[in-house]
């Protein structure tokens, strides 16, 4: 009887050891496969963590290096840290599809302890088109400290440099709601910018001149933002009914002088033929 019990114990021990060995072997194989193949399972109902097929195609078709410098880094409130984390995850996934043509870097604008040097960094980022956000936080002593956050990036592609601002500010929504919207729009903002920068020929926009419209300096902000996506020029109609041929859009920014009937007719015909006009 004793021999039978000993044999049973040995069989049980061997069975447990075999199962443990098999389990460890499966874990090793899974880790080896995970290091070779990339996959992600998105269990959210609205697939918020899955990039679209169109985005994957855009990234696979990159024909030059895309370099993205992200300035959303450093010490920030938890809402902005969450946005940073989501952006980092998304860019990591973009890298899978963009391969060697897709690169990104996170930069902390407030890294320097020298106030003068830090201000110069802030100024340079602002001049690149990335807009800052001032955040007031309460400290442990009950006071308030101000932090400057740059929730944006600069994308360099095919010799062009374009700023992308991630923060969505919708009037009437709380700060948390706006941050959630900003997170949902990350993919669109980045991919849409890359797609527009990929265009070989840019649509043409004419800023109308000759009737006392605002000059180039006065519309500098809007032209800077549009220049990455459109071919901009100042245009005086001067009675030419075909002056707007080839343009997709005309901008009438202000004006202090009356339009001649011929200029009005040229603009009217432009609209009738599918052109669009923005009156500012």
Image: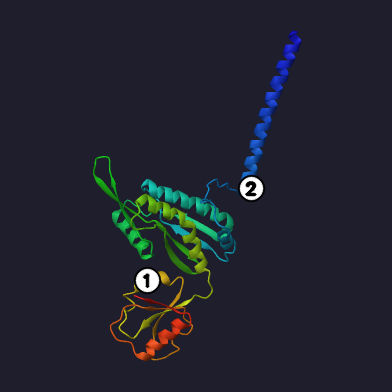
For the N terminus, the quadrant is top right
Residue, disc 1? 222
Q: How is the image coloured?
A: rainbow
Q: Residues within 10 Å of mark 2 (few under 14, many from 20)?
A: few
Query: Splitting the image into 4 quarters, where does residue 166 fall?
Result: bottom left
Q: Percent x, y for residue 226?
A: 42, 71
Q: Which mark is residue 112?
A: none
Q: Are marks 1 and 2 in contact (CB under 8 Å)?
A: no
Q: Secondary structure at mark 2?
A: helix
Rendered position, 262 above or below 200: below
Residue, disc 2? 36
C-alpha gap between disc 1 and disc 2 = 46 Å
The label nearer to you, 1 versus 2, is: 1
Query: Splitting the image into 4 quarters, where does residue 25 fall?
Result: top right
* Residue at x 72% of width, y 12% of height: 5
Q: Secondary structure at mark 1?
A: helix
* Residue at x 55% of width, y 66% of height: 64
Query: Splitting the image into 4 quarters, where does residue 55 fall?
Result: bottom right
* Residue at x 47% of width, y 78% of height: 248
Q: Percent x, y for residue 221?
A: 35, 70
Q: Percent x, y for residue 113?
A: 32, 51
Compared across the picture, whether 142 is left or right of 244 comes to left
Residue extending furthest toward the top: 1
* Mark found first going from the N terminus, 1 or 2: 2
- Residue 237 visible in image: no
Rendered position, 82 above or below 156: above
* Residue at x 70% of width, y 16% of height: 9
Q: Percent x, y for residue 109?
A: 37, 55
Viewer-side residue, 67 vs 164: 164
């Amino acid at each position: 009887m004793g021999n039978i019990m000993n044999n049973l114990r040995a069989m049980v021990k061997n069975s447990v050891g075999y199962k443990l060995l098999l389990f460890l072997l499966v874990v090793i194989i899974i880790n080896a496969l995970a290091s070779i193949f990339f996959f992600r399972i998105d269990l959210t109902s609205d697939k918020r963590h899955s990039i679209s097929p169109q985005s994957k195609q855009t990234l696979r078709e990159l024909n030059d290096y895309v370099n993205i410098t992200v300035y959303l880094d450093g010490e920030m409130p938890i809402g902005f840290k969450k946005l940073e984390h989501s952006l980092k995850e998304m860019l990591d996934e973009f890298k899978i599809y963009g391969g060697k043509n897709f690169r990104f870097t996170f930069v902390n604008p407030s890294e320097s302890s020298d106030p003068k040097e830090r201000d110069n960094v802030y100024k340079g980022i602002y001049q690149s088109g990335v807009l800052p956000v001032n955040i007031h936080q309460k400290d442990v002593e009950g006071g308030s400290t101000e932090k400057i956050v740059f929730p944006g990036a600069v994308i360099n592609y095919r010799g062009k440099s374009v700023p992308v601002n991630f923060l969505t500010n919708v009037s009437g929504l709380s700060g948390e709601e706006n941050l959630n919207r900003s997170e949902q729009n990350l993919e669109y903002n980045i991919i849409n910018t890359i797609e527009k920068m990929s265009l070989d020929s840019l649509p043409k926009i004419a800023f109308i001149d000759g009737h006392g419209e605002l000059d180039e300096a006065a519309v500098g902000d809007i032209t800077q933002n549009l220049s990455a996506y459109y071919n901009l020029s100042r245009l005086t109609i001067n009675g030419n009914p075909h002056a707007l041929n080839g343009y997709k859009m005309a901008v009438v920014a202000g004006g202090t002088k009356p339009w001649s009937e011929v200029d009005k007719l040229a603009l009217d015909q432009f609209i009738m033929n599918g052109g669009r006009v923005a009156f500012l």
